[in-house]
Amino acid sequence: MQYQKIELGSYNIHMIKTDKFKTVNMQIIFSDEIKKEEITKRNFLADMLTYSSKKYPTKKDLATASQDLYAASVYSTCYRLGKYYNTDINLYFLNEKYTEEGMAEKSIEFLKEVIFNPNVTNNKFDSTSFQIVKNNTRIQIESLKEDTRKYSMIKMLENMDKNSPYSYHGFGYIEDLENINEENLYEYYKKFIATCNIEIFIIGDIDFAKYEELIKANFKFNTYKKKKNDPCIIHNKIRSRVKTVIEEDDINQSKLTIGCKVHDLSDFERNYVLTIYNIILGGGSESLLFQSVREKNSLCYYVSSSSNKVDNLLIISSGIAKSNFKKALTLIKKEMKNIELGKFDEDMIERAKTRYISVLDEMYDYPNQIISAYYASVVLNFDFPEIRKEKIKTVTKQDIINISKKIKMDTVYLLGGKGNNE
């Protein structure tokens, strides 16, 4: 696998050459500091751009054009990364070695059409496409409450700190959606194109010189790269007493979500030790939480933990009977304390390391995951995957004990249902 970076005035090109895939995957990442009031509009815009364009004014027209390019696909994703909000416009197409000469250029021109030539007339988006996308966006936002696990997570984070970016949810907000119209969405599009930090990644069995010229010829952004601040969220306040919030709802299975703040970490602790700590605590069927709360005591339907190194958070999730709330919480606190006291086997550390390395190896089977890994390395200053494999091996039991003292339970949120028995 070969990597080359081309620095331009308005964006960078990152090219990754590998013969592992028959496709070429291209990802244009637009990034800017997050503003809560713009999340809904950003999501809406991303969906509009990949729904239709001036040249392909309906979803059917866009799909037909994709089929003419040997089933090329273009789609968008939006997500928060610490203090930043990213929108990825993605394209994948068959390498022209398996189609015909010139298809790479036509596919990239197709992506250019989607990004630079939106379905706009008289400075406003096409009303028909706009209403379809708006209705879909509304349905998605309103369906959030139906996913009680995700809803519980959002409510916990809002109770932790409603003003912090980690409490902003990616679905958007109905009140903001109602204020979006065809005109102000187009005004936002112009701001989006002109002010975001932009990184272009492309991966496949590619010729670097050829694809550099194709990208330069088709993507001419008129903004100068802004210096990105550290995306990591630092917690200036750590609660001395855990905040507990219980919300009643008409559901059978209660959702318990616990937010822990992580503070004063070194880069090594954040990138490696926290990962191993999380796997040992709640990262699967062999974890302390699963074995204690579910297997030995039968207090939950599921229990797991996840760490977010950019947000400096560790989150524990569990589905329980409401009557088991206090017992489950007590056991969770006990297992966290056990790690702090060193009451866990060295074998658990080795299994966690093996699992981590296995996940890294599996990453190489998916082009978009490789791009994500390189983005984390070259944009967020994380180590490259091969370096990660070696550094993870150096994590010790004492490292895990030390970091456990920097993880503080902050907010406990229970979405309490009517079910009392498992």
Image: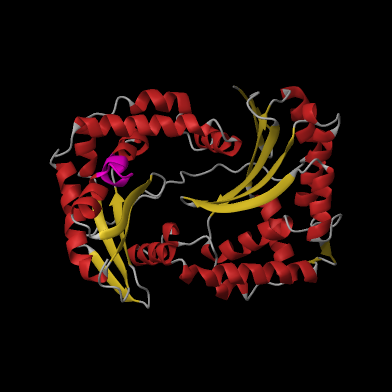
Say above or below: 258 vs 88.
below
| Residue situated in front as seen by the camera: 300 or 10 | 300
In the rendered image, the residue lying farthest to the front is: 422
Q: Quadrant of residue 29?
A: top right
Residue 421 lies, in percent from the top left, at 25, 69
Residue 382 lies, in percent from the top left, at 45, 33
Residue 273 lies, in percent from the top left, at 30, 35
Is residue 236 visible in the rendered image? The answer is no
Is residue 133 visible in the rendered image? The answer is yes
Horizontal side of residue 295 vs 271, given as left or right: left
**Colour scheme:** secondary structure
Q: Residue at x 65, y 23 (%)?
A: 19
Quarter in which the C terminus is drawn: bottom left
**Residues in magenta, as a range:** 277-287
Q: Is residue 265 magenta?
A: no
Question: Total of numbered circles in the picture?
Answer: 0
Quarter in which the N terminus is drawn: top right
Q: Residue at x 34, y 68 (%)?
A: 253
| Residue situated in front as seen by the camera: 288 or 135 | 288
Residue 25 lies, in percent from the top left, at 67, 37
Q: Residue at x 20, y 30 (%)?
A: 346
Horizontal side of residue 42 vs 100, given as left or right: left
Q: Residue at x 70, y 33 (%)?
A: 23
Say above or below: 149 vs 394.
below
Q: Quadrant of residue 286?
A: top left
Say above or below: 38 vs 249.
above
Horizontal side of residue 174 vs 201, given as left or right: left
